Amino acid sequence: MWLEPELFRTVVAAAPLVAIDLLLRDGQGRVLLGRRRNRPAQGCWFAPGGRIRKGERLDEAFARIAREELGLALRRQEARLLGVDEHFYEDSVFGPAGQGPTTHYVVLVHGLDWPGGDVPGAAAPGQHDALRWWPAEALAADPGVHPHTRTYARLLRPGAWPILKQGEPTT
């Protein structure tokens, strides 16, 4: 269900949003990030992701977010649930800090291994102005990467998220 802006503003002001973030990892252990065009986290490198809509099953939300953010046809069964995180922002899509509601997300962080090293494409042009592969150590240290995404570096330590062989089950 898509919400009209005024109703969505009320929801953002009154309740947490539930979202999915995608950590897409290539064969070199690098993770794909997008530089956000919009609030919150505007101008920062961030994991691709999006909110789950009312009435949308997790599998549907995962596939939609992968398609809209990355232009990829991915299934949740191909991913590994890495953890649940929470993100708090002083701003929102409705304005900078102090001029709109704050934003609170509960985030289901999923990891996927991507067989090719090329950036999948310029999907979600309204969301990101660039996509880039980041080595885990650079992601953890770069001030241009949003602090919420930098915390994901703990999930990228060697052995914390095994690279799967083709056909190996993820659950």
Image (cartoon, rainbow, N blue to C red):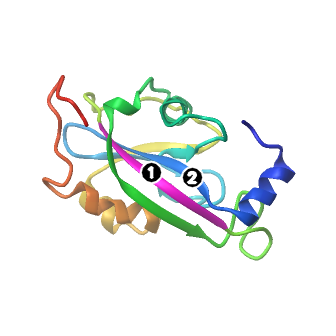
Spatial CA span between label 1 and label 2: 8 Å
Are the two marked residues, 1 and 2, in contact with CB atoms closer than 8 angstroms?
A: yes
Q: Earlier in the sequence, mark 1 or mark 2?
A: 2
Q: Position of residue 70 (x, y in %)?
A: 48, 33
> Dot 1: what SS?
strand
Q: Secondary structure at mark 2?
A: strand
Mark 1 belongs to which amino acid? Leu
The main secondary structure of the magenta stretch is strand
The span picked out in magenta is 103-112
Q: Could you tell me which residue is drawn at 86 percent across and 52 percent down?
A: 6
Quadrant housing residue 89: bottom right
Q: Residue at x 44, y 51 (%)?
A: 108
Q: Is residue 107 magenta?
A: yes
Outermost residue to the right: 6
Structural crowding at the residue carrying mark 1, measured as other residues with C-alpha within 10 Å and reported as few (<14), some (14–19) or many (≥20): some
Q: In the rendered structure, does residue 6 fall within the stretch colored magenta? A: no
Displayed quadrant of residue 43: bottom right
Q: Nearer the viewer, residue 169 or 157?
A: 169
Report which quarter residue 2 is drawn in. Answer: top right
Q: Which residue is mark 1?
A: 108
Residue 103 seen in the figure: yes
